[in-house]
Amino acid sequence: MSGSQVPTGSSADMLARLKAVLPTRWFADATPVLDAVLGGVAAMWAGLYALIGFAALQTRIATASGPFLDIAAQDYFGTALTRRAGETDAAFSARIRSNLLAPRATRDALIAALIVETGRVPVVFEPFNTGDTGGYSSNTLGYNAMGGYGSLMLPYQCFVTAYRPVVTASGNNGGYNFGPGGYATAPMAWSDLADDPGLITDAEIYAAIVGVLPVNGVAWTRLSD
């Protein structure tokens, strides 16, 4: 705030600043004509002040908004990371920043990437890793409970079960083969991807996996609901 208690950078603030530097003895107490002339300049300056503030916000991903976030994503990731249908600036900004600083080329990196992408923890099994396969007489094996068949013929490979995100249907409407809605019976309605901003495609999940794998790694992936 300036001394007149008006918002800094507003037209009224700029007008007061202009009048403050003029000799007071040149003008009467009431100056409607002068105020009108200076008001035009003040309005222009107020617009420039607001533009400078907006431009400053766009220089950082954490504060950028609108198309400037899309430009940043294009600069850093090309077409590998784009805004989803209906995705908010806050959600898109968080996704850009998490991908910029995300770890790569490790098992933990793969798990973290899928958690960010889907919100659910995947299952990763490495047949070359005894910590996953378990071993006889070590209390690390159990049918359908823990452990699994390993193989020394599959180095640098893993089996991944990734889970699609849990997304509430548009407006809590039902869908085909899901009641209780139906034609002319609520809750059921036509919708598109824009109505489900949390919805991601299978291709995006696969891309998240590929994005963190080392060049010699292979992830045999199964998607599940």
Image: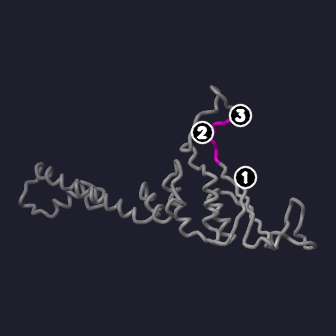
Task: Give the farthest residue toward the left.
Answer: 26
Q: Residues within 10 Å of mark 3 (few under 14, many from 20)?
A: few
Of circles 1 and 2, the one toward us is 1
Going from N to C along the chain, the mark reached first, 3 or 2, is 2
Task: State the mark number for residue 179.
Answer: 3
Task: Name which residue type carries label 1.
Answer: Ser
127 is within the stretch colored magenta = no
Q: Which residues are magenta?
A: 167-178
Going 50% across and 52% down the picture, which residue do you hit? 88
SS of the residue at dot 3? loop
Going 10% across and 61% down the picture, which residue do you hit? 24
Task: State the mark number for residue 171.
Answer: 2
- Camera-side residue of 198 and 73: 73
SS of the residue at dot 1? strand
Q: Looking at the magenta stretch, what is its main secondary structure?
A: loop
Q: Position of residue 170 (x, y in %)?
A: 60, 40
Task: Name which residue type carries label 2.
Answer: Gly
Task: Name which residue type carries label 3.
Answer: Gly
Residue under pointer 1: 224
SS of the residue at dot 2? helix
Going from N to C along the chain, the mark reached first, 1 or 2, is 2
Q: Residues within 10 Å of mark 1 (few under 14, many from 20)?
A: few
